[in-house]
Every structure is written in C-alpha cells, then in structure tokens.
Amino acid sequence: MAFVDRFNSAVRRAPAWPVYAVSAAYAGWVFFQGATGALGPNPVEAIEHAYGEAALYLLIAGLAVTPLRRFAKLNLLKFRRAIGVACFFFVAAHLLTWAILDVQALDRVWADIVKRPYITVGMAGFTLLLPLAVTSNNLSVRKLGPKWRQLHKLAYPAAVLGAVHYVMLVKGWQMKPLVMLAIILVLLALRLPGIGKPRRSRAETRIRSRA
C-alpha cells in the first residue's frame, strides 16, 4: 500500500476531538504562564500575541487542507471543521484578552477600533469569522445546502485580514508576520481555477465537445 493510502486510512480512523483538546490545553497553559509571571513583564500582551498567533497557524492549517488533497492526495477533510472551530476559539480569546484584560473599558474598545487601523482590520476579520462559527454544525450544513460552502469562503478574506492585522501590529518589517501572510496568499492562489488540474489534450477536448 502506498504511503498516501496508508496515511489516508489512518486519518479516517483518527478522531477529531484531539484538535479541540490540544487547543483548549494550549490556551489554558498560556494563560497559566501569564498568571504566574512566566511570560515576562507584560503578560497580557504576551497572552494576546500567543492566542493571535495560534489563530493564524490554525487558519493556515485550515487553508492547507484543500491544496494537500488536490496536489498531494492527502485527505485531511475530517479535521477541517475542528481546525476552524479551534481557530475561532483562539481569535475570540485573543479579542477578549485585549478587551477585558488590556483595554478594560467598553468606550476605549470602540475608540481603539475606530482610531487604530490595525485593530480595525483585525475586527473586520473577526466579523467575517462570526457567521462561520455560528454555522459550523451539521444542522446549518443541511439547512443552507450549497450556500453553506459559499458562506464559508468568507474564511479566505478573513485569513488575509488576520495576517495583515499581524503585519501592521508588529513594529517594523518583521519576517514572521510577512511569511505568514505570504503562505496564506500562496494557499489562496492554489485555489484559483485551473491550478493543479491536468490539461486536456486537443483530442480529449474534441471528444468532449462532440459529446
């Protein structure tokens, strides 16, 4: 049996719940480190950044599922919903940490959203993810039908906005946020029509046109 077949067979037997468990454990571990002074002189900012980066890593993981299936024949579709839900969990934790522990005032939260472009961009990405989180259940999939797939394409602009938020957040042109933005753009480009699909020969085209 080829490696791809063995890998896909193992994935089919693996449960998706460890994605949720590991995400919750990591979030708790980061918060515990912040509460016990292990994250340096500004633990709130460190927690914000850790949660935000975790969300971006999961966004990238979710966007990579389709290209991996198309180009490498590795089928990780089973985990895509869990990855998406975990991603939204970290985005929400990132936002709540900023609003409750950092800003600590509702009027200042709104003022920062309006006045600071990087926060405006981040909130726009969060807003796009909200309907995806609400409809990430089997009932919504059945009710929405084909519209569900169209709706969940909001993850594409949300991923770009999240990465741009990170680039704008850091001081100067740091490599890590730029690399994450580049990876997201490449993963989105791989979804463009025609990429990765074998070209038909002229004979095949003639046969299909006569059919």
Image: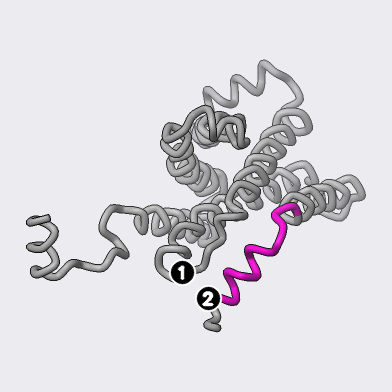
At 60% across and 55% down in the image, what residue appears? 78
Q: Residue at x 70, y 18 (%)?
A: 106
Let me know if residue 53 is in the magenta part: no
The residue under label 1 is 73
Q: Residue tagged by mark 2?
A: 4
Q: Estimate the x, y position of residue 60 in percent, counting from the top left.
A: 53, 55
The residue positioned farthest toward the right in the image shown? 36
Which region shows up in magenta? 4-17
Q: Please tell me whether residue 1 is drawn above or below residue 68 in the rendered image.
A: below
Q: For numbered disc 2, what is the local secondary structure?
A: helix
Classified by dominant secondary structure, the portion drawn in magenta counts as helix
Residue 39 x/y as whole percent: 81, 53
Q: Amino acid at mark 2?
A: Val
Q: Is residue 23 visible?
A: yes
Question: To which quarter of the image does residue 11 belong?
Answer: bottom right
* Spatial separation of the CA atoms under disc 2 and disc 1: 7 Å
2 and 1 marks in contact (CB < 8 Å)? yes
Res. 119 visible in picture: no
Q: Is 89 rendered above or below residue 23?
A: above
